[in-house]
Amino acid sequence: MEEELDLCRTSMAFFSDQQLCYADILSAHEVRARIEVAVINFLKALTSPDPAISNLALISRKSRNSRVNQGMLTDVSSIFLSDMLSVRSLTKANAAKAFVRVWKVMELCYQILSHEKRVTQRELFYKLLCESPDYFSSQLQVNRTIQDVVALLRCSRFSLGIMASSRGVVAGRLLLQEANQEIVDCSECGSSGYAISGDLSLLDKLIMRSDARYIIVVEKHAIFQRLTEDRIFNHIPSILITAKGYPDIATRFLLHRMSRAFPQLPIFALVDWNPAGLAILCTFKHGSVGMGLEAYRYACNVRWLGVRGDDLQLIPEESLVPLKPRDLQIAKSLMSSEFLQEKHKEELAQMVESGRRAEIEALFYHGYDFLGKYITKKIVQANYI
């Protein structure tokens, strides 16, 4: 009884005494148990002698609650969230719908786990749109509510039965094999590459072999296709991977797995010289504040190969494009972050000061085969940060 009262007093805050908080990988049974505890606590508060609707205390996903954790025996640094709480309350007009959304998503996740199924965020959105149109009108609301549930229950989204929607592809000197399946040679998958599954449990069980010496993360799919068409991995023994823009969880997960499977391989990033390109690099490298409870599970030591400020001499003046207001917003956010290393700050300051940005494609001014030469030269000369 004393333990139950203590559980009720915590108001559904799991492990809140930890300075650094993270989301556990749990079995379906354990997740359902945490949801049941949340329901019991809510009902106890509602039926107590002094009835009240208890607030939902979530780990805050604000940047001021983030920390950067540097491993003692590794070069990898990742974002963690501290134990500051934010609240979803039914009694506050601006938070009432968010409060109800959390319960709706938890209810659906409980059903999914009970049936031993998995769904994507998109599938979850359409289910909620049909069942609760007054509360869910956009994918963004669903995505944020899933993060609320992760922050409440302290379990990963995959533990909730939610699969990542993957856009990523991989190519080059990598052999992949799923259980009881044929070996896939990623160097023979054509310019489109091998599609990365959104099933993290499948990615976690992949058998991987490689004779590569480098891993190259490419921001854009078009650049990835150009490099695979040129079979750059035959000239520079490498694995190419792209998320086709801002990195999704599955692509980050596979990159992290490769970094663990092949710890001797340096990881280089080829991104546009603009704030968005740097943000993409930093997400692969450190994770994101929005997913701070799970960031450590995907962080890798990614080095910035290009495009960088010292490459502007290779790019015609006419190819430099003015920064947009959105670029400046991203730059401001990055500058205020705790994780941005000094050399990255210098590059970002140069972008803002110049008021211009440079895209990878601008290097094609020197010919369509120049990009491979550019990458090779920078790697050989150790010209990366």
Image (cartoon, helix red, strand yellow):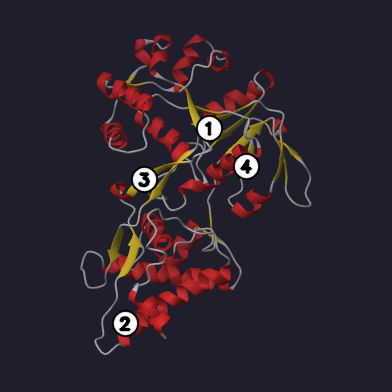
Q: Secondary structure at mark 2?
A: helix
The nearer-to-camera label among 2 and 1 is 2
- Say which residue appears at 29% left-offset and 67% top-offset: 97
Residue tagged by mark 2? 45
In contact (CB < 8 Å): disc 2 and disc 3: no
Q: Which labelled disc corresponds to residue 221?
A: 1
Residue 182 located left or right of residue 87: right
Residue count near mark 4 (Cα–Cα under 10 Å), binned few <14, some 14–19, many ≥20: some
Mark with earlier residue (2, 1)? 2
Mark with earlier residue (4, 1)? 4
Q: Quadrant of the C terminus?
A: top left
Q: Amino acid at mark 3?
A: Arg
Q: Where does residue 51 sit, x and y in percent of width and height?
A: 26, 85
Q: Where does residue 37 sit, x and y in percent of width and height?
A: 44, 76
Residue count near mark 2 (Cα–Cα under 10 Å), binned few <14, some 14–19, many ≥20: some
Q: Where does residue 307 sit, x and y in percent of width and height?
A: 44, 21
Q: Is residue 197 above or below residue 350?
A: below
Residue tagged by mark 3? 67
Q: Is residue 272 above or below residue 367?
A: below
Cα–Cα span, label 2 and label 1:
52 Å
The nearer-to-camera label among 4 and 2 is 2
Cα–Cα span, label 3 and label 1:
32 Å
